Amino acid sequence: MEEIRIRTGRISDIAHILHHRRAMFAEMGGADESVLDRMQEASELYLREALVSGIYRAWLAETEAGRVVSGGGIAIVPWPGSPDFPGTRRGWILSVYTEPEFRRRGIARRIMETIVDWCRSEGFAHVSLHASHDGRLLYEKMGFRPTNEMRLYLK
């Protein structure tokens, strides 16, 4: 089995990050191509600023030949603090995706462990994510638990 290394994402990796994000949503279903196009445009605008400013951090898994096969990231947002986390920022893990032919090799777990380790080193008390059906088992095994979050759709 070829060696896979995890590295920090850079601004030059936007195409890979966008590909993973789009493929993740496409596989989950429920969005047609025009909706995915709009999401990708918005994501690119966000990433071009957020990767440079540091409010989005990405990690990518790549083969020895340099092929990016998996990735994930975290959005860091200002926060006024709460009793369970009196800090001034929160993190949401986003866009964890592995190319189909590289699944079931522990790569997504390694991406997640890298992100979680980084969060610990940065002093986050907790981190959140929205789990797909396929990702839920991994996240539960890593200790993620459901919370009381609710959502109201305005459009």
Image: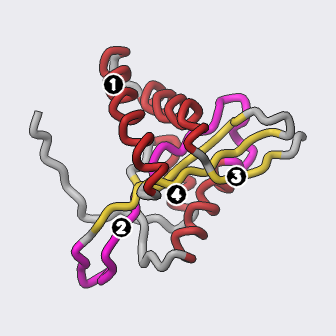
Q: Of the residues tagged 1 and 3, which is closer to the observer? A: 3
Q: Nearer the viewer, residue 101 or 80?
A: 80
Say what amino acid the circle numbered 4 marks. Answer: Tyr
Is residue 81 highlighted in magenta?
yes
- Distance between mark 1 and mark 3 Cα atoms: 31 Å
The residue where tag 1 is placed is 30
Q: Of the residues tagged 3 and 4, which is closer to the observer? A: 3
Find numbered disc 3 in the image and state the secondary structure of the residue it sits on.
strand
> Which tag, 2 or 3, sits closer to the chain's start?
3
The residue where tag 2 is placed is 90
> Which tag, 1 or 3, sits closer to the chain's start?
3
The residue where tag 3 is placed is 7
Find numbered disc 1 in the image and state the secondary structure of the residue it sits on.
loop
Q: Is residue 34 left or right of residue 53?
A: left
Callout 4 environment at 10 Å: few (<14), some (14 to 19), or many (20+)? some
Q: Which residues are magenta?
A: 80-107
Say what amino acid the circle numbered 1 marks. Answer: Gly
- Distance between mark 2 and mark 3 Cα atoms: 22 Å
Q: In this rendering, is residue 28 above or below 147? A: above
Instruction: Check contact, mark 2 vs mark 4: CB within 8 A.
Output: no
Find numbered disc 2 in the image and state the secondary structure of the residue it sits on.
strand
Instruction: Check contact, mark 4 vs mark 1: CB within 8 A.
Output: no
Callout 1 environment at 10 Å: few (<14), some (14 to 19), or many (20+)? few
Q: Quadrant of the C terminus?
A: top left
Q: Quadrant of the N terminus?
A: top right
Instruction: Check contact, mark 1 vs mark 3: CB within 8 A.
Output: no
Point out residue 51 in the picture as x, y percentages from the top left corner: 48, 49
Q: Nearer the viewer, residue 84 or 62?
A: 62
Instruction: Check contact, mark 2 vs mark 1: CB within 8 A.
Output: no
- Distance between mark 2 and mark 4 Cα atoms: 18 Å
Tell me what residue is drawn at x 48 percent, y 43 percent.
Answer: 95
Residue 139: which numbered mark, if any?
4
